[in-house]
Image: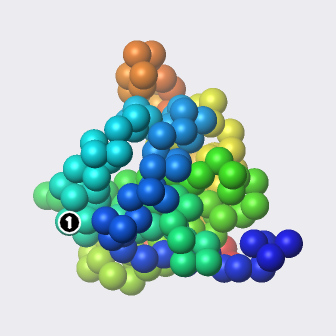
Amino acid sequence: MAEERREITLRRFDLSDLDDYMVWASDDRVTAFCRWDSYTDKEDLRRYMRETVLPHPWFRAVCLGGRPIGAVSVELGAGCDRCKGELGYALAAAHWGRGHATAAVKMAVRSVFREVEGLERVEALVDVDNKASQRVLEKAGFAREGVLRKSMVLKGRTRDLVMFSLISTDALVD
């Protein structure tokens, strides 16, 4: 299949990506385990992109054939947490199960460790029921550290989260 041969790339978002972003940001299957609700209004998403995504130091479009099919970000810590960042990602449902999320996570981690001085740890918190996302992180070389019980209220329910991490001295999976 032609899509399978195309490589995943990462780049900064642009407002012209709004329609592509809306594909996954409005899909309840994609946002089920996200901290944010599905977007139903394009203007709300445009505002979010303008105010949050575009100025964010590490928020990238996951692209296939140059077009965004998802997003990956690292929220960098500050103060005594400046040595770490929290990874987040979402991918359009049409592209699940093809290794694209794993490829994007590997690329993001390699880049952020190179680009951010003093960054020693990238962590990801995943809902205990989100087995697919846990598998993405495992395939990308993240270590499962444990379960944080009743750690977050997500969409009205208190949830257990699995903590994963990759530190700068870990061997990155190729």
- Which residue in the structure is indicated by mark 1? 55
Whether residue 105 is situated above or below residue 123 in the rendered picture: below
Q: Is residue 123 visible?
A: no
Count the marks: how many?
Answer: 1
- x then y, percent, for residue 50: 22, 58
Image point (28%, 45%), residue name: 43
Whether residue 165 is situated above or below residue 32 in the rendered picture: below
Image point (48%, 75%), residue name: 10
- x then y, percent, for residue 128: 59, 32
Secondary structure of the residue carrying numbered label 1: loop
Left or right: 97 as drawn, with respect to 8: right
Q: Is residue 132 visible?
A: yes
Is disc 1 surrounded by few (<14), some (14 to 19) or many (20+) residues within 10 Å? few
Image point (57%, 54%), residue name: 91
The kind of residue on which mark 1 rests is Pro
Task: State which quadrant residue 172 falls in.
Answer: bottom right
Judged from this view, the residue extending furthest toward the right is 1
Q: Nearer the viewer, residue 16 or 107?
A: 16
Left or right: 63 as drawn, with respect to 76: right
